[in-house]
Image: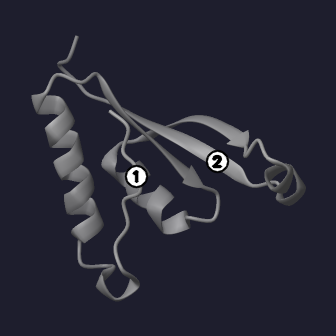
Amino acid sequence: LVLKRMSVRKDYRGLGIAKALARTALDFARQRGYRAVVLNTLMLQHEARALYERLGFRQHRRYVLPTAYGHLANCTITTYRYDLPGTP
């Protein structure tokens, strides 16, 4: 399962909404027998990266965005993976 474009409006951050959304996505994947949840985040998204790591996601891969801008700005993408226990 790929988690894509999860965000919480700035004035609602810090209320546990993102954590609840991420846990709901993990529960959804677990109930359907997925082996893992994978997501990408930009190097600038420090709060999101910290949240994913607190929830148990592990850095899986890092790479520079494969575009001219990505190389020029050294725009690094980090792929996170959460392996779901108890799935085949």
- Residue 40: image location, x then y, percent: 52, 46
Disc 1 vs disc 2: Cβ atoms closer than 8 Å? no
In the rendered image, residue 43, in percent from the top left (x then y), is placed at: 64, 57
Mark 2 residue element: strand
Q: Quadrant of the N terminus?
A: top left
Residue found at the very far right of the displayed protein: 72
Outermost top residue: 88
Q: Is residue 42 left or right of residue 50?
A: right
User: Is 45 situated left or right of 27 in this image?
Assistant: right
Nearer to me, 35 or 14: 35
Quarter of the picture holding the C terminus: top left
- For residue 2, side relative to residue 79 (left or right): left
Q: Amino acid at mark 2?
A: Ile
Q: Residue furthest bottom?
A: 11
Question: Mark 2 highlights which residue?
Answer: 77
Instruction: Answer few, some or many: residues within 10 Å of disc 1's Cα (few below 14, many 20 plus, some between 14 and 19).
Output: many
Q: Residue furthest left?
A: 31
Residue at 79% from the left image edge and 47% from the top image edge: 67
Residue type at the position of mark 1: Tyr
Image quarter for residue 33? top left
Q: Is residue 88 above or below residue 11?
A: above
Compared with 68, 83 (above or below) is above
- Number of marks in the image? 2
Q: Is residue 36 above or below residue 11?
A: above
Q: Secondary structure at mark 1?
A: helix
Q: CA distance from mark 1 to mark 2?
A: 14 Å
State which tag comes first along the sequence, 1 or 2.
1
Disc ID at residue 65: none
Give 80 or 29, whichever is nearer the viewer.
Answer: 29
Tell me where residue 60 sits by quadrant.
top right
Closest to the camera, between mark 1 and mark 2, is 2
Q: What residue is disc 1 on?
A: 52
